[in-house]
Image (spheres, helix red, strand yellow):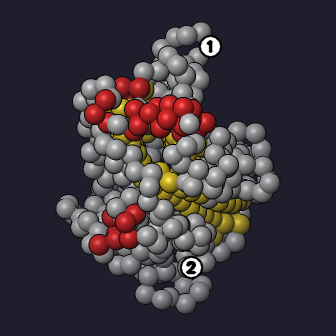
Amino acid sequence: MINALLLAAALAQVAAPADAPKAPRGPTTLIPPPFVPEVGADPARGGQPTGALPPPYLPGARQFLIQPGQTWKHVLEDIRPGDEVVFPPGFHVPQEIDGLTGTRERPIILRSRDRVPAAVACGDFGWKLRRPQHVIVENLMFINPTGAAIVIEGAPGDPNPWIAEVTVRNCTIAGNRPSEGQDAVRLDRVSDVRLDQLRIDGWVDAAVEIESSRRVLVRAAMLVPPEPAPPAFGIKVLGASGEISVTGCAFNKRVRTGVAVGTPRPASGDATRAVDRMRIDRCIFEETGTAVSIVNVRDLVVSRATIVNPTDAVYAVPEGASTVDKVLIEKCLGFWTPGTLARFSPHPDAVPPTGISLSDNLWYSRELPEAWEVLGAPFGVQLAGQVTSIDPGIDAGTLKPRNGEAVRYGAFSMTASGAPRKAENPGEATEPPPLQPGSAPAQPRR
């Protein structure tokens, strides 16, 4: 009886936000999505028969048809802004292209001829775009890179991000030949890049690796890990990156870490520059090891995430973490089967809890609240009480909550009212509904 009373008193002290230390100034991460071109994103527009060139997206644009197995470096001198490089079905060769340049009004478009995508048979990489500007890549498949399928990088030797203005959309990356360090998409020292509605089937290190890059939007990505070995990361953000938006993405089963934010502190103890201004919004993490790993960041918001049956942690500050400052976790929904979660939010003792703020969230398992003693209470300063008494009734197929009391939380909370946010600026894409596990990215409509 005495032990039960002591446990109840301890849990009450953990859950009471009034007794928590004063919270730091809240995060300011309000990241507008980068400009998304209105041209493109409609393969074979007009229902053209297979084998016929689709009409160009822009008036006066020329189309260069590249046959399977043929390099397309020979057309680069002739390409003008607004032109298209078109690929019929078949296997196309890897390419390394330097300085492919369109304009904001007339981007250069690289796309499949037919609705059935052309395939790039990768070597170390599929396409490496160095110093591109105003380029759209759409409706293509990249197969079996050993390094990375799509590489977008800045100028050699220049540490500053290259203003790329590149959109990669409606593409599939399939990797069924695992190799050490294998990524699907790799961004290196670039800014203004949109990765929109990608499906990534198979990788080893990271589905998307972002290194020292800024103004990056990863939207509606479906990440499907390979069998049997789990990949290390879904999305990994490293170095001096900033203004990163990850929204509406689905992290399917077996990913060890869904999103890792920041570079670990090196063994020498030297400081590393933190990621700044990042937002993870309306994502679904199903049976990942850890949904979000907070390594080295200033100003991070994790909002409206649905986290189902994590095995290692809901969120974590790993050993080797450096800066953890102005992190907000809000309106998230976490659910797990009793006995499947190792720790709720593990962290080194040296990291102060004042760096993380917890707004209203719903965490539910039938083992709560008693299991807080084993799992550890949510790490951070509680700005509001953490709800643990509402069973969301997670649907096993869609991962939507069936309980009406839980619809204020998680990835589907925004669309519960049926009123998604409208675009405020021309060319700005509206927020898509979150992808459901196992579903393919929806084709956009014009």
x, y percentage for residue 164? Answer: 40, 45
x, y percentage for residue 308? Answer: 56, 56
Which residue is farthest left? 424
Q: Which mark is residue 382?
A: none
- Give the Cα distance between marks 2 and 1: 51 Å
x, y percentage for residue 236? Answer: 55, 40
Left or right placement of residue 227 versus residue 87 in this view: right
Query: Which residue is labeled 2 in the image?
Result: 114
The residue under the point 54% across, 27% down is: 347
- Residue 398 found in image quarter: bottom right
Left or right placement of residue 96 versus residue 32 in this view: right
- The quadrant the N terminus occupies is top right
Q: Is residue 156 above or below residue 39?
A: above
Q: Which mark is residue 267?
A: 1
The residue under the point 19% across, 62% down is: 424
Which of pointers 2 and 1 indicates the residue nearer the eye? 1
Q: Is residue 278 above or below residue 75?
A: above
